[in-house]
Amino acid sequence: MSKKKRKYYTVWKGQKTGVFESWDDCKAQIKDYKGAQYKSFATFEAAKKAYKEGPKDYIGKSKTFKSELSDAQLKKIGQPNYNSISVDAASSGNPGKMEYRGVDTKTKKQLFIQGPFKEGTNNIGEFLAIVHGLAFLKQHKSDRIIYTDSRTAMSWVRKKMCNSKLDRSEKNKDLFELVDRAVKWLKTNEYATTIVKWETKAWGEIPADFGRK
């Protein structure tokens, strides 16, 4: 069994800022902090360098990202629509601890975050993130679109169901209560929001990415 690579976490905006050596320490600084800014790095030196330079070139689409698509393909896809929000989920294991969030696509400002839940899957998180985004935009009477990088979650939302194979248990009871609420919301609410697949190969990681890859 391969040993999990260690990561370091830079927090530019949070309860405390600096470089942290575990996700739990990083999470403690950003939880419930409006507009938190943070990212993971493979080495302490890289994390420290990023902290000194600031978040501008590190959060969201990296300045070093270079698409492998052809110029013709990139032209066909075009640029992201910044009148939008982006949603994403992260799961430590499948199933494992899971959380999701939504951000402003252009500024990466965090608009909402939920979790971590003790036991969940990435697909469930992506599904909940989209539904949360739909409710958020409807509440604010916004005409923005939603970007997600999960075709599975898009399909579940379209069918108004969460087709997860994860068994319900005491460990994930709170998560499935939220899933049930999300499904009920989809079945009892109308919305005009367009849900669009984020083109990762053309634009890099989705702005809501948790930066743990």
Image (spheres, rainbow, N blue to C red):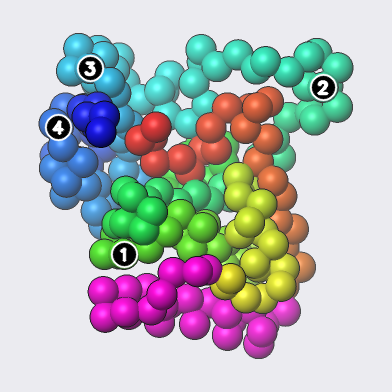
Residue at image location 18% in from the left, 18% down from the top: 44
Q: Nearer the viewer, residue 27 or 123?
A: 123
Depth-wise, is mark 2 or mark 4 nearer the camera? Answer: 2
Q: Quadrant of the C terminus?
A: top left
Q: Amino acid at mark 2?
A: Gln
Q: Reading the chain from its start, which is encountered first: label 1 or label 4?
A: 4
User: In the figure, 127 relative to 135: above or below?
Assistant: above
The picture quadrant where one finds residue 203 is top right
The picture quadrant where one finds residue 190 is bottom right
Residue sticking out furthest to the front: 1
Q: Which mark is residue 73?
A: 2
Question: Which residue lies under the disc numbered 4?
Answer: 20
Q: CA distance from mark 2 to mark 1?
A: 39 Å
Residue at image location 41% in from the left, 75% down from the top: 167
Q: Amino acid at mark 1?
A: Glu
Do residues under tags 3 and 4 come within 8 Å of each other at their CB atoms?
A: no
Residue 112, percent across and down? Answer: 42, 58
Q: Give neighbour class at mark 3: few <14, some 14-19, many 20+ (Cα, 10 Å).
A: some
Question: Which residue lies under the disc numbered 1?
Answer: 119
Q: Secondary structure at mark 3?
A: loop
